[in-house]
Image: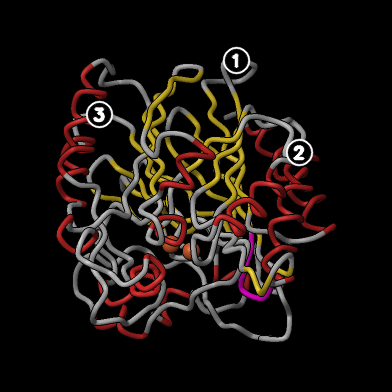
Amino acid sequence: MSRTSRRELLRHGGALLAASSLPLSVVEVAYGQGSEQNFTFAYISDSHITQVKGNEFVRNWDRGLIRAVAETNLLDPKPDFIFYGGDIAQLGKPAEIDHGLEILAGLSGDVHYVMGEHDYYVDLGDYWRKQLGPDHYSFDHKGVHFVVLNSILTHEAWMHQKWETGMQRMKQMARLDNPSGQPFMVGEAQRNWLRKDLRKVKKETPIVVLSHSPLQKIYKGWNFWTDDAEQVQALLQPFGKVTVLYGHVHQIQTNQIGNISFHAAMATAWPWPYPATYRQQNSYLPKLTVEMNRADPFFERDATGWQFIDMHSGRTDVSYLLPDNANRVVAFDESVGHPVDQTDYAEAGRKSPLQHY
Ligand SMILES: [Fe+2]
Ligand SMILES: [Fe+2]
């Protein structure tokens, strides 16, 4: 991406940020200055539409999604399409999915959907698939191969054991720190599908994978984890430039494993803080690039934010725009081979947030 177009992108972002701040990503894929192949796409995730009763839904979560849709429609340049990253619903109820889709129907442009565990475990994804189609698929767009995976499956025996109700199973998966929960996985059938899908892709083609849970192991207690992550990574490692974009964690994370860059999206609903346990982990820990200080719990958008993702030549630079927090850019640094927070904290007179974790 050229410097000019990046400045323009940031300027547009700044204008939108002045209006409001939302968990929305814009991804730009660029092949060089003035190339007709350059394009952007938007990425909205984790709205957790929650039914109170009848037509009454939790207002704050509705508002987050409504604002994300409105701002996406104002983007200039217009994104080629939009990804929705999963967890439309809180408890997977048809009323919640329908209400979320009603809001998302306001988007001008095609939307590609990713399955979240909150959409899935009440009926094993039946209603979601009836409304939206397959939960894993791929397509090519202007020289980039996009892959969508359903990463929130788990052991068949657990999924299909005798539950009194589907909602009982849903509630096992809808909470953190639940010893009765199960780890997420892509599963053998989808890994085989992915292996076949990638056979037709050239090694130099940039690949962008969308999953709901991170395709890396971060923190099992909160299911910020995909059990067969290494097996999926092994299928992606032969390719030169791979980016995995995921939701689910409701916070900013950046990591690099081999050729794969990982970036998480903020949620439109609420942020999860970084668990203190992260600090005790010696491995798997991604680069944590921003404090989750939850400064003002009465501010509905506190610790949420939005980000531009600039994929120049298939690499990712992420500009995080955060209400009540300094903006920051995490860019792929060719000299070290992984994304690096570009903020000069000494110059800004602030401590690096990385020192806190
Ligand atoms: Fe979520
Ligand atoms: Fe989730």
Q: Secondary structure at mark 1?
A: loop
Q: Amino acid at mark 1?
A: Ser
- Quick check: marks 1 and 2 in contact, CB under 8 Å? no
How busy is the neighbourhood of tag 3: few (under 14 within 10 Å), some, or many (20 plus)? some
Ligand 2 image-quadrant field = bottom left
- Quick check: marks 3 and 1 in contact, CB under 8 Å? no
Q: Give the quarter of the image for residue 221.
A: bottom left
- Which quadrant is home to the C terminus? bottom left
Q: Amino acid at mark 2?
A: Leu
- Residue 230 on image: x %, y %: 16, 50
Q: Is residue 285 above or below residue 264?
A: below
The Cα–Cα distance between marks 3 and 2, rounded to whole angstroms, is 31 Å
**Mark 3, residue position:** 239
Badge number at residue 35: 1
Q: Which mark is first along the chain, 2 or 1? A: 1
Q: Is residue 153 above or below residue 53?
A: above
- Residue 253 on image: x %, y %: 43, 61
Q: Which residue is depicted at the point 40% across and 55% down? A: 120
Q: Give the quarter of the image for residue 60.
A: bottom right
The Cα–Cα distance between marks 3 and 1, rounded to whole angstroms, is 23 Å
**Mark 2, residue position:** 75
Q: Which mark is first along the chain, 1 or 3? A: 1
- Residue 247 on image: x %, y %: 46, 56
Magenta region, residue range: 301-305
Q: Nearer the viewer, mark 3 or mark 1?
A: 3
Q: Nearer the viewer, mark 1 or mark 2?
A: 2
- Quick check: marks 3 and 2 in contact, CB under 8 Å? no
How busy is the neighbourhood of tag 1: few (under 14 within 10 Å), some, or many (20 plus)? few
Q: Secondary structure at mark 3?
A: loop
- Residue 346 on image: x %, y %: 55, 72
Q: Which residue is depicted at the point 48% across and 47% down? A: 127
